[in-house]
Image (tube, rainbow, N blue to C red):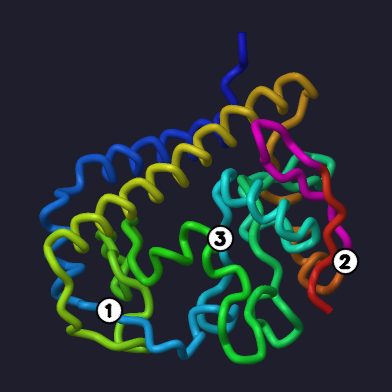
Amino acid sequence: MIKIIPAIEKQLEAVKDELQGVHDYPIGELISIIQEVGFECDFCARCCTRQFNGHVFLLNEDAIRMKQIDNNCMEPAPYFELCDQQGRFYVSGYALKAKKDGSCIFLNENKRCKIYDQRPTICSLYPYMLHREPDENGNVDWRQISGLNQHGCYHTEISDEEASEIADQIKSYEAGYLSQLIDFFKKAEEHFNKNKLKHVQGVYDREMRKFNKGAEITVFVYYNGEFIEHKFKGPE
């Protein structure tokens, strides 16, 4: 029997609630938003930079594909979910690496993706999304578009068929991401129980301060149902 770990269970229940919310979100409303926004890429490549877009999180199937393309193109995703009392971090997946200028490792000198036909799922859906987050006033609500009016072209006509297909893909991606997160927390709870570990926020904060100053840390990345250990050095 797996012992319940409150710090993990709290996050696990929140993710389950978010997943149910994604399933329940009206598909017609999402289709309407997609058509109203009418986003069209103008090849500015801003979304392919960390400065504008943070990081590219990889679903497990994406990570498998990226590893086949380039075994050295991934790193532990940021915003680690857990840290044990020994100062080792745990994260739910990989992210694509970036070059020194912050652009994606697969972005070429002409601002084109070198693996466009095999790009990660989130790249093919961007800027569309479906998750809850707080606004500037702290009110939590659904967000469906990233970087609105900051890049690309808008009010392009999108057919009902195309908008419906995009909406289905968005829901599928978000459900896949949240399901991976649920599996991660379940595996972490099993691992923590087996090895007599616990999540300690104070240790997390201390080790993150060191990491952000360039120190090397240990990160266990959830991949293919297992934890893969990495030594990961912070930004200098």
Q: What stretch of residues is rendered in magenta?
A: 216-228
Mark earlier in primary sequence (1, 2): 1
Q: Are marks 3 and 2 in contact (CB under 8 Å)?
A: no
Q: Nearer the viewer, residue 169 or 131?
A: 169
Indicate whether residue 204 is drawn in magenta: no
Q: Residue visible at 47% across and 46% down?
A: 177
Residue at image point 88% right, 66% down = 215
- Identify the residue under disc 2: 215
Q: Nearer the viewer, residue 163 or 146?
A: 163
Where is residue 15, by image quadrant? Answer: top left
Q: Return the disc, 1 or 3, that comes first in the chain's sequence.
A: 1
The quadrant where residue 92 appears = top right
Secondary structure beneath disc 2? loop
| Residue 97 screen position, x and y as percent | 70, 68
- Mark count: 3
Q: Residue furthest top?
A: 1
Q: Taken as a whole, is the magenta stretch helix, strand or loop?
A: strand
10 Å neighbourhood of mark 1: few (<14), some, or many (≥20)?
Answer: many
* Image quarter in which the N terminus is found: top right
| Residue bearing mark 3 | 118
Asked if labels 3 and 1 touch by Cβ distance under 8 angstroms, the answer is no
Q: Residues within 10 Å of mark 3 (few under 14, many from 20)?
A: some
Disc on the earlier residue, 3 or 2: 3
Q: Residue at x 29, y 88 (%)?
A: 153
Residue closest to the eye, 195 or 168: 168
On residue 39, the disc is 1
What amino acid is at disc 1?
A: Phe
Query: Residue 179: image x %, image y %?
Result: 46, 37
